[in-house]
Image (cartoon, grey):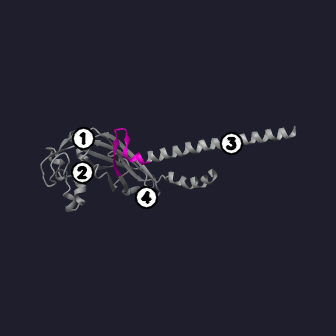
Amino acid sequence: MHIKLIPTLGLMLPLFTALAQANVEKTIFLAPAPATVPSEEPDLDDLGLERLSPQRPVVRTHLNASFPSAAAPGGTDSWFFLENLNPGQRYEVRVCWLATQPTTFTLNTYALPKEIEDKNLMSSLSTYSAAQLAILSTSLQANAIPRRASPHGSKDPLDPAPTSDSVLFLHVQAAADYFSTDQALMQNVPPVAVDLILDPFLFNVFPRSLVPTAGWIVLVTVLAVVLGRWAVKEVGRVVNDARRQSVLEEVKKK
C-alpha cells in the first residue's frame, strides 16, 4: 500500500518546482504620513506618471535603458507614483524583467518634500514627465495627480482641491548590462519589458505575495515529515524481520 504512494508522490513533485525565467530587484520602505496632494508646488501637477496603489499593485510596461555614462551612471531614469498607501505600513516594490534582457535596475522612493528640495531629482522628474506627456493621449493626460480620488480625501475624482494621502515617488534607473558584437544593440538599447509590483507586508514582517509560497513550503515540510517517519518505520520493520529470520535459522540449526 505504501509502495504505491511513491509513483503518485513522484508525479506531484513538479508542482513544487518553478523555472527561473526572470530577474528581480526591489526596494523596501515604510509608507509616510499623509501629505497634501497636490502640494503648492505647481511642477507637481499633471505629471502623467503611471501609478501603483494597493488597489492597482501591478504595472506592466517597457522601460528605456542605456549604458552607464558619466552623466547618467545609473542609466535611464523612469518615474512612477505610489498612492493610497497605509501610513506606517511596510511595503516593497519589485521590478521583474526577463533574463534575456540583461539590465541593472536601481530603485528608490522619495517623499514629496524631499523630492521638491533636490534639484537634480526635480530635473530628472521634469524631463521624464515632459517625455511622458508628449506621448500620452488626451484621455490618459486626464489621469493627473490632482484629479485622482483618494480614500483619505475628497470622494469626487473631478474635484481639483488638494487631498491628503500617503504617497511617494518611485525612481527607477535602468542600466544596460550586456556586451554584444551587434553594433546596433550596443548603440541602441531596446526597451526592457518589466512588471512593477507593489507588495504590502503582513504585520510589517512578511510580504503578502509570499503567503502562497509559505503555504507550499509548509505542505512540503509536512509531507517530508510524514514520509520520513514512514521510511523509518519501514526500515525498522525490515531490520526486525531480518533479525527474527536469523534467530529462527539459528534455532533450526541447533
Q: Which mark is residue 223?
A: none
Which residue sits at x=53%, y=54%? 14
Judge the density around disc 1: few (<14), some (14-19), many (≥20) Cα neighbours within 10 Å: some
| Image location of residue 148, percent across then percent down | 19, 52
How far apart are labels 3 and 4 at the CA level?
69 Å
How far apart are labels 3 and 1 at the CA level?
66 Å
Marks 2 and 3, the one that precedes in the sequence: 2
- What kind of residue is marked 3? Arg
How far apart are labels 2 and 1 at the CA level?
19 Å
Question: Dot 1 lies on which element?
Answer: loop
CB-based contact (under 8 Å), mark 2 and mark 1 = no
Question: Dot 2 lies on which element?
Answer: helix
Specify whether 119 is left or right of 98: left
Seen from the viewer's position, the closer of residues 145 and 116 is: 145
**Residue that mark 4 sits on:** 183
Residue 71's quadrant in the figure?
top left
**Residue that mark 1 sits on:** 111
Judge the density around disc 3: few (<14), some (14-19), many (≥20) Cα neighbours within 10 Å: few
Question: Dot 3 lies on which element?
Answer: helix
**Residue that mark 2 sits on:** 127
**Residue that mark 3 sits on:** 237
- What kind of residue is marked 1? Ala
